[in-house]
Image (cartoon, helix red, strand yellow):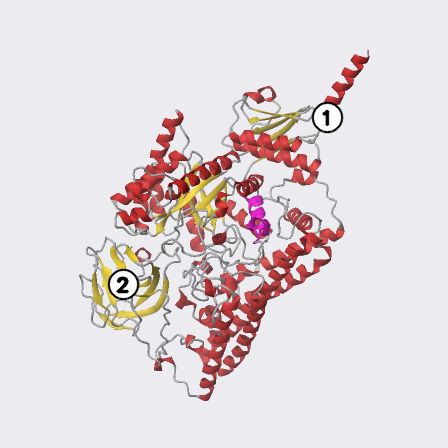
Amino acid sequence: MKKTLFALTLSLSSLAFATPKVEVSARATPREKFGAERLREAVSKLSGNEHILLATRQDALLAKFDTKIPQLWPGAKEAFALERVGKTIIVAGSDPSGVLYGSEELADLIRAEHALPKRLDFIDHPQLKIRGAVIGLQKPEITYENAEYDYPYTPKDFPWFYDKAEWTKYLDQLVEQRTNALFLWNGHPFTSLLKLPKYPEAQELSTTQLEQNIEMFRWLTAEADKRGIWILQGFYNIHLSHNFARAHHLPFHLSAPSELSSEYTRYCISEFIRKYPNVGIFMTLGEAMGPHYGPEWLTKTIIPGVLDGLAEQEKTVGHPVPQPPIVVRAHATDIEKAMPAATAIYSNIDTMWKWNGESFTWTNIRGPVKERFQTLVKGSNDTIVNMHLMSNFEPFRWGDPDFVRETTRSFVRLGIGGVHVYPLRYWDWPNSADKTDPLLKQTDRDWIWFASWARYAWNPEREPQTEKIYWIEQFAKRFAVAGNLNAVGHSPLTVGLESPEVLAAQKRDLTTLQRETGAHLLAAYELSGQCAPEVIRRLGITEGNRQVLSLGMTMPQLIDAARFNPAQTLWTGDAPDGERLDEWVANEVNHGKHHGENPLGVAADAARKSAEAVREAETAAPGIAADAMPEYRRIVNDMRAIAALMAFYNAKVQAAALVMRYGYDRDTNHLTEARRLLAESVQHFARLRELTENTYRNAAGMQTSQRQIPVRGGPTTNHWRDLLPVYQKELAVFDKRLARLKAGSFTGPGADKASQLPEIGFTLESGGGETFTVAGGASLYADQEMPITSVVPELNGMKGIRVSTHQQTPIRFRLDKPAQILVGFFKSESRKARNVSPDTEQWNIVLPDAVTQKKGLPISVWAKPLPAGENDLDLGKGAYVVLGFIPEETHVTPHVNFDPNSKQPPNLDWMFED
């Protein structure tokens, strides 16, 4: 009897301490098995005899429950259903990813309730098919043989790439936020990830290093795959292995295809697909290569390479393999011609295009940008939005969840199928710009950026007031609850995908003070978050990374934006209706009708909102937990810095408007008031310099000469301390010019005649173009008389290259030193005749209307940096002429001409420039 009682007691004890059982299909994929592991961890501290089944909807494991589980709709992707039938809990997915996400949802419910749900009847699926994160294997500076975008994968340049523990944390965050794609950017990654037996001369790394990279990438792709994440490796075209290029006497980057470059690139892609079964590719067809070669290169080189690799994969595994994804950027290429040709031979191919260029300016789009997206959506399986670089936010914290939600709703309305989200500090991953020791991780500092995109890419149709409460609670938990945030901003909390069911299950035991703290911090982020988008779209030169908004703008950039190659779509497509500063001033002077956003009103509004954001952030102080205080102080400092920046813009744009009014009526009283406001703007910038001196390493992640606004980029022009002297000098020059104007002794800048620019020597290879001396009477074409009638002094006597009117081959030349190439483009009303892609930021206008010809419009001169050594230039059959090569560091100052016959106001840049 005692033995029976003991056995019964033991049996009851075992039941009491049993944990729920998790079972997967006999044919479970790595994704399903990973989901099961995560669930086992979630139930490991629970007691119970429930049975949890994980499988795809039609799997045999779920057959006996077929009538109890809802049917998922035909074609469902990544969808799942959760159901409880007695002691059995069912996770049914439309596919392995659906099973994985269903497991994540159930685990969230378990963590919220600290128990298995008593009832379950829940279906969910994502709104966007592709939900992508971005990491660049690229550096702030051009470090590899002066070749843009090219960086071999090495521990020296990318130590984080080899850290499996950090990768595991990051990949776990991605799966918890249901991100299903990770885009890795590089110029030419293949020689860092592959042995290329066919081209041994292409190898760029030691064999030991290459083998380490291959092992690491195989591990990474397998770990990502089991978390439902496709790795997509990016590359530029046509970029070559530098050793391969040297061996074959070619430039590192080609502007036109050749048989050899096509064979080499096709082989690289084939080996990549063969070697790594869980990858896709995405590419930039243009920039180096001429836009018109895009269809040919895509259909005759890239897609055949993928198909070659796929065939080799299928031979190895013995069964058909789904096509890996290909994503083509609609950037600097003829995408409208490329895609129809590509989809005829490959089905799993999507397009990608930038939403607001290289900034975040608006929750919507209109005009030419909207039309472009509509065309892409119509001609693609899926079009992916590229949230690219976020140049107008650097380097400060940004997080306005409702701005992200409304933007994602716009994606859905337009039929866009995916989003590809850059980190806020792309060029310096994984570190933020904060001056701390150790450096802050972006995944910690910018948690709300990553979380809001993940949350709304899954489902943007959430009730706004409920969402506001959600984000207040996230701030409160992070900053007002002890133990949830350490000194370097790391938190154990994962934020982003909680469903209404999970939120309803959570015990909300926050105090009133904690909730108020969260509300103040959210308000600060929302208010400051509206400032940079508004200011860049009304006052900026470009949304591109050519401009660093946080470093300010010069007066010429405000009063004479046309001189700086403004991106027209910044205000015609990436902004609501409104006026640019020149248009607003003209309407004011001529009593014209104003429309839309007012640039002065926007600047004043940003100054007001940013000041209010400071007050909100400071008001949160009493509720901040002690361990969260270091990050809280950094937030408050950011809010103060943004307020100083917006006050700078507010004062300066008012000054600019008054200077422009002087151009119409020559009333020097406008200049007197402008001088007061300009001095005020310098004071605000001095305050900004003070706030950032010991808190930020620099402003922009990219530290190359591609940055042009407000000044030429580089390590010595990337901090507010570097720019303050620029604005102080601008004020000093204005004081001198204003004094001379008032004294009546100033005759204008024409008295200081410009002289010829310094030249860099070059050697032109035979086969395309001919050299000539740029001077009056010289023909601009090699095969046709088109004489120059006048040329600015900077170019007079320069050695240039002219081509024939039918030029179809690239011109090839060797530069003695790094240089800027000066190219004159003949103006045309035809969009097809444009040689400079409006999508690329590499070209910058330096001398407007610098050369006149007997017939035709004046020719403006554009500059682009080029490395020393072999280069080529292929601008298609358009009209262009090379007008010389100047040193890389040379600054070109444009001419100022007072034309008494002109109906336009005069150019007044000279009032601020030596």
List the residue tagged with mark 1: 17
Q: Residues within 10 Å of mark 2 (few under 14, many from 20)?
A: many
| 391 or 226, nearer to the observer | 226
Q: Secondary structure at mark 1?
A: helix
Q: Secondary structure at mark 2?
A: strand
Residue 598 placement, left or right of 769:
right
- Residue 834: give x, y in percent of width and height: 32, 58
- Residue 235: give x, y in percent of width and height: 39, 46
Tell me if residue 62 comes above or below residue 750 in the rendering: above
Q: Quadrant of residue 503?
A: top right
Q: Is residue 404 visible?
A: yes
- The residue shown at (73%, 22%) is 15
Q: Is residue 148 inside the magenta stretch?
A: no
Going by the numbered disc 1, the residue's amino acid type is Phe
Q: Quadrant of residue 572?
A: bottom left
Circle 2 or circle 1, nearest the eye: 1
Q: What mark, if any, has residue 88 been given in the picture?
A: none
Tell me if residue 802 comes above or below residue 732 in the rendering: above
Residue 221 placement, left or right of 441:
left
Q: Is residue 452 inside the magenta stretch?
A: yes
The tag earlier along the polypeptide, 2 or 1, is: 1
- Residue 34: give x, y in percent of width and height: 56, 32
The stretch in magenta equals 439-457
Q: What mark, if any, has residue 882 been given in the picture?
A: 2
